Amino acid sequence: MRKSSFWFETALLQQGWSHGVRATVEAGRFTSLAPGAHQPDDAVHAIAIPGLCNVHSHAFQRSLAGLAEMAGPDGDDFWSWREVMYRFLDRMGPDEMEAIAAQAYAEMLEGGYVRVGEFHYLHNDADGRAYANPAEMAARIVAAATETGIGLTLLPVFYAHADFGGTPPNHGQRRFITNPDSFARLFEASVAMLRGGGNIGIAPHSLRAVTAAELATILPLCPDGPVHIHAAEQVKEVDASLAFYGARPVEWLLANTDVDARWCLVHATHLTNAECDRLAASGAVAGLCPVTEANLGDGIFPAVRYLHAGGCFGTGTDSNILIDPASELRALEYSQRLRHMGRNLLASDDSASVGARLFRAAQAGGAQALGQAPSMMVGASADFLTLDAAHPALMARSGDLLLDSWIFAAGAAAIDGVWCRGRQLVSGGRHVHRDAIRARYRRAVEGLLSA
């Protein structure tokens, strides 16, 4: 059984900041975390904090980043961006999928994410037919996670319709489409693939892509795992839900499903006050992706009210246009400053530090959303980051000021090491396989853009 040890000058443990922490790791888990230990001769790190969980990723969209920033003749919004994404997918095969996912996952690790919830809906080939292995594309996600070392919560997506009421899918959606029987086969094949590592949840795409009957049919496939669903990302979606169900998406989910701590409602951008408070009280996680939501012009999540009501949240990189958890947390706070024209709006009575409040909440909520235990405690997976104390933004800081400075003044550039299950995957800010992963990614993207 492999055993390793570390010494941290300062570390953010579950109980708070501690100094002189001696950590031992066996079989990928912390077996001890002892503050006040003398500094040893090796394995010394200045600052250690828990890694974060990325609750919402579409890995294949990393290759699309920057390709939809040209203005169209009739104005641009989420729906016009979606059409660009559909056209881009026409060219992507399994090999490209694996290369792009590996690049995205390596960047996530370099930024401080140690586990990803892959909201995976690219199931079929370019003609819309199922592969011989119904989980062929999911297998490529698993391969990319294995290569990079990131923890994986695979979230196979059920996607059957173009809009509310069972509207038939359009041509651009052919690569996503499943029915209850084909999805059951996909799910079973995905479970079998993950027996060597990773865990699985289930992801009905959205109420516009899944009927109420289909939702009731697929949820029992995964009775104990996470349940993730897009909800209320766009005003158009909310209006269509009102027209069909007579209820808003989050309102309908809260009234007609057992939304609880297993659930993650992704985006949940457009909420009434009553929905906001009920979602907070449900124990579910709001899966917030502020960078993507800003890029797509989705709107601003009511974070001040939601957190005041005790709501849980995690962050995700969604379209992967920029991969940096500090940027997600910073964008969340800045969106509230712009909406309410004030500062430090997401601090709390328990934490005057905005960075500390956001980091701790995102760490706990992210772990919950992906079916994991929080890190940096005995028995937990040894998933942690070390920060560069010599980075200008972190100099002469300690305690919660480190989190404030990392989130608001440094970001990924201040990360010098990342460990998952006790294995170092990022050193000096670089993934240990960065060059090989990037070379494969470059070949994949050049092929896609020249096709």
Image: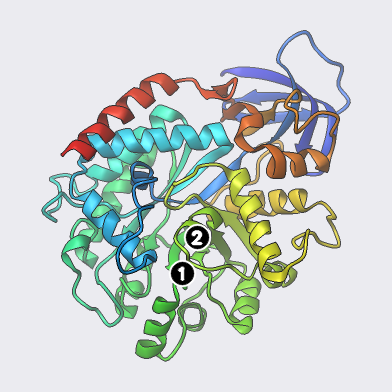
Which of the two marks, 2 or 1, is nearer to us in this view? Answer: 2
Point 53% across, 68% down: residue: 299
Q: Amino acid at mark 2?
A: Glu
- Badge number at residue 233: 1
Mark 2–mark 1 distance (CA, rounded to whole Å): 8 Å
Residue 111 visible in image: yes
- Badge number at residue 316: none
Q: Amino acid at mark 1?
A: Glu
Point 64% across, 72% down: residue: 280
Residues 391 and 178: in front is 391
Residue picked out by circle 2: 293
Question: Does 256 appear above or below 443?
Answer: below
Residue 140 occupies which quadrant of the picture?
top left
The C terminus: image quadrant: top left
Q: Are marks 2 and 1 in contact (CB under 8 Å)?
A: yes
Image spot of residue 8 (x, y percent): 77, 24
